[in-house]
Image (cartoon, rainbow, N blue to C red):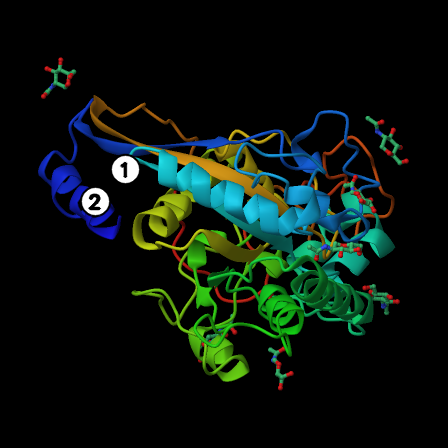
Amino acid sequence: MMSRFSLLAGSLLSLTAQAQAQNGSYIQYSTVTGYFLQDEPSTNATTFDYTSTNFGLINRTYPSDPCGYGSTNLTQWQRFTRQVYTLNLESPSNIDYKVLFMGRHGEGYHNAAQTFYGTPAWNCYWAEVDGNGTAIWADAHLDPAGIAQAQTANAFWAHELAVQMIPAPQTYYTSPLYRCLQTANITFSGLDLPASQPFLPLIKHGLREGISIHTCDRRSNRSVIHAAVPSWPFEPGFPEYDQLWNGVTAETSSAQAVRSKKVLDDIFGADPSTWISITSHSGEIGSILSVLGHQPFSLNTGAVIPVLVRAETVKEQPSPTTSSQPWTVSPHCTSPPLTSINNGACVCQGSAMPVTTTLPGSGPTYAARV
Ligand SMILES: *[C@@H]1O[C@H](CO)[C@@H](O)[C@H](O)[C@H]1NC(C)=O
Ligand SMILES: *[C@@H]1O[C@H](CO)[C@@H](O)[C@H](O)[C@H]1NC(C)=O
Ligand SMILES: *[C@@H]1O[C@H](CO)[C@@H](O)[C@H](O)[C@H]1NC(C)=O
Ligand SMILES: *[C@@H]1O[C@H](CO)[C@@H](O)[C@H](O)[C@H]1NC(C)=O
Ligand SMILES: *[C@@H]1O[C@H](CO)[C@@H](O)[C@H](O)[C@H]1NC(C)=O
Ligand SMILES: *[C@@H]1O[C@H](CO)[C@@H](O)[C@H](O)[C@H]1NC(C)=O
Ligand SMILES: *[C@@H]1O[C@H](CO)[C@@H](O)[C@H](O)[C@H]1NC(C)=O
């Protein structure tokens, strides 16, 4: 499995780089529906609680169920595990099924501040500064509510492992933003995990939140991250400084979708695991879901969504062209707006026009990347 994908990454693409419609291999993703409530159109994401619904796993029979399975007392997760194993066994070598458990970080100080100030004032001013003197939200940490949400996820995993015999993740990935480091750390601490599958997440830049001019989207230096979680590995080439956040322009959703496809290609191309944990953000998980062809499903802070993914490697075909919009400037105010205006545009104090440069004091400015 690994050699198949690294051949693609290593030779085919580089030989034909720049070609308009190059013939290489690419991975086509889809969500296999019918297994989880989260991919049913009738499920309301706002009120959905993954902890009271067995992660959303639908009670059903599978073609792979053993004869008379009812008398064997296999749990729904044990039978689903057999089903996923069977799907992989019976599919051709260019088709791979994986289950992604994607967890959104618990509530951070930036989430609380957005609620406190209201979204317009947050977007137009407060999100561009590091904090308000009481709370700091640059690379926000979890607030007490967010820590409690991660503890809920931890207790739920403990329950599912012990009662449902759910397969423990075989590999773990996390966004480099601090709120995700904390969430993953709390969620998977103290669990009865197999010794061969330790909780040691790989820190991947591609899992970070959509990069706006908000200081909560600027990551800490690598050395700061390393000091917080010294045993966790970084993906190769992870730089000391954040080279993407610039405080002036914001990643567009199409550019983010290209990044999400790339991070999925990285993971599916190199990781033979079937059961994978990803800790990330609402915007980034939403972007990954769209690449996977999953219906939109907005996660509440601290919530986890499992997705059964079918990945098909299509060979020797022109890969579909993906276009992405360049990053755009984000007009904002240099002092708090007097009122919150709900039309999405910033209305600054007095007759001040919104600015499109970075704010003094909002941190270092790096070269804009488009
Ligand atoms: C790419 O593949 C298509 C379909 O197999 C083929 O018709 C076409 O000639 C190929 N193009 C190149 C540049 O190899
Ligand atoms: C989902 O639930 C929320 C909260 O109860 C409600 O406001 C919303 O209308 C519901 N959405 C749909 C599509 O039913
Ligand atoms: C599945 O069935 C069990 C009882 O057998 C029930 O407790 C649980 O709520 C059901 N789960 C779903 C998602 O319907
Ligand atoms: C399955 O569970 C039922 C009820 O808990 C029990 O009576 C039965 O002996 C169990 N069967 C097996 C094969 O363990
Ligand atoms: C700063 O923001 C927090 C919300 O994150 C709020 O609770 C606090 O009261 C604010 N401090 C000031 C001085 O307004
Ligand atoms: C991770 O968990 C360990 C053990 O509970 C703790 O000592 C450490 O401070 C945590 N680190 C972070 C970044 O939350
Ligand atoms: C990263 O380190 C540099 C050099 O020490 C420092 O100037 C900068 O503020 C740091 N960046 C962040 C986001 O803390």
Q: Secondary structure at mark 1?
A: loop
Q: Picture coordinates of residue 361 (x, y %)? A: 60, 67
Name the mark on residue 4. 2
Horizontally, is 16 left or right of 100 in the view?
Answer: left
Q: At x 56% / y 58%, what residue is drawn?
A: 167
- Say whether residue 311 is visible: yes
Q: Quadrant of residue 316?
A: top left
Q: Picture coordinates of residue 106 (x, y %)? A: 72, 61
Q: Secondary structure at mark 2?
A: helix
Q: At x 55% / y 62%, what residue is drawn?
A: 168
Q: Nearer the viewer, residue 352 or 207?
A: 207
Horizontally, is 159 left or right of 274 in the view?
Answer: right
Asked if the residue at tag 1 contacts the one at tag 2, i.e. Cβ–Cβ closer than 8 Å, the answer is yes
Which residue corresponds to mark 1?
A: 93
Q: At x 60% / y 67%, what residue is drawn?
A: 184
Amino acid type of the residue that numbered disc 2 sits on in the rendered structure: Arg
